[in-house]
Image (cartoon, rainbow, N blue to C red):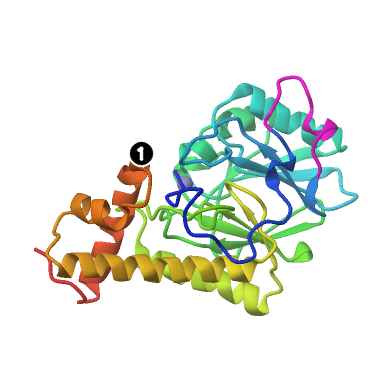
Amino acid sequence: MTAVTPPGGPGRPGQGGRSAQAAPSAQPGRPQAAVGGWAIARALCVLAPNPSPMTLDGTNTWIVSEPGSDLAVVVDPGPLDEAHLVNVVATAEGFGKRIALTLLTHGHPDHAEGAARFAELTRTPVRALDPALRLGDEGLTAGDTVTTGGLELRVLPTPGHTADSLSFHLPADGAVLTGDTVLGRGTTVVAHPDGRLGDYLDSLRRLQALTVDGGVDTVLPGHGPVLDDARGAVEFYLAHRAHRLAQVETAVEAGLRSAADVVAHVYADVDRSLWPAAELSVRAQMDYLREHGLIELP
Ligand SMILES: [Zn+2]
């Protein structure tokens, strides 16, 4: 699950640029290579056919590979959709690449549900922070660097959307794969109680540092288009979170006590179909405010 801000919601500075949807939806039997292209030198998006208000255009499955290498890493195989998974393999093969490893940004089904089947198709291990999602001997932890076929991907813990959320820093391209921590459009859900706002703000600041002095310009998100202004995108997220937090604090101080009431007040501009997801974020925000002594709630 991901987006809360509707397409007509707050805009973002620097939004636009290259679009992940340049690689259109999976079409059975038709390799993406025939129509897609590399978003950046080392990463190619294959869009899963699972669009929804929560998943935007669908899940971005990323094929990441060093130029000239015949090995590739896949980040987030996506939902359990056989045609999509087969298409990811065919796309890699179309570029002369064999998939050697699968990584997960987090365990939500729109990113991870297809991982076990994908591992069968490719006979590759699956590495993730959550041991329950792993297939094979290796996990992923802070400070790990994945090196496959000359590729370098640095593992960056970015909890908050979920406790197990990771981002992958691709230094050679000045890019970061963010899963649902930063999306190509709208803003993400802090999926209370697993996701926690304090963690999420720390993660955004970690990503911000990468954009300020880590050479990162490009966000390769789990949903929505590629962002060329990574720093602007992360700072928009931080500002948006601060704005929502202030709104929630004001609503509670005005006497609203339940998360549902706060959502109806603060997210009045957001489509009602997204309110259940927004309520998770509001619960995370109310927890944060209570823990910091900013509001008093029973
Ligand atoms: Zn998610």
Q: Which residue lies at the image location 71% right of the left edge and 73% below the top edge? A: 215
Q: Nearer the viewer, residue 141 or 40?
A: 40
Q: Nearer the viewer, residue 251 or 290?
A: 251
Residue 8's x, y, as percent?
A: 49, 50
Q: Which residue lies at the image location 58% right of the left edge and 41% below the top edge? A: 136
Q: Nearer the viewer, residue 108 or 117?
A: 108
Q: Which residue lies at the image location 77% right of the left edge and 62% below the top edge? A: 173
> How many residues crowd around disc 1 within 10 Å: few (fewer than 14), some, or many (20 or more)?
few
Query: For the view shown, which residue lies furthest in the top direction?
Result: 29
Quarter-of-image position of residue 27: top right
Which segment did they paint magenta?
25-37
Secondary structure at numbered mark 1: helix
Q: Nearer the viewer, residue 130 or 113?
A: 113
Q: Which residue lies at the image location 59% right of the left edge and 53% below the top edge? A: 184
**Badge 1 is on which residue?**
273
Q: Is residue 165 left or right of residue 289?
A: right
Residue 18's x, y, as percent?
A: 74, 53
Quarter-of-image position of residue 271: top left
Residue 34 is a magenta residue: yes
Three-letter code for the amino acid on which mark 1 is drawn: Ser
Q: Quadrant of the N terminus?
A: top left
Residue 208 against residue 151 in the figure, above or below: below
Q: Is residue 279 left or right of residue 77?
A: left
Quarter-of-image position of residue 296: bottom left
Instruction: Note whether residue 170 is visible.
Output: no
Residue 140's x, y, as percent?
A: 56, 55
Q: Quadrant of the C terminus?
A: bottom left
Q: Is residue 263 left or right of residue 93?
A: left
Residue 66's x, y, as percent?
A: 82, 53
Residue 237 against residue 43 in the figure, above or below: below
Residue 245 is a magenta residue: no
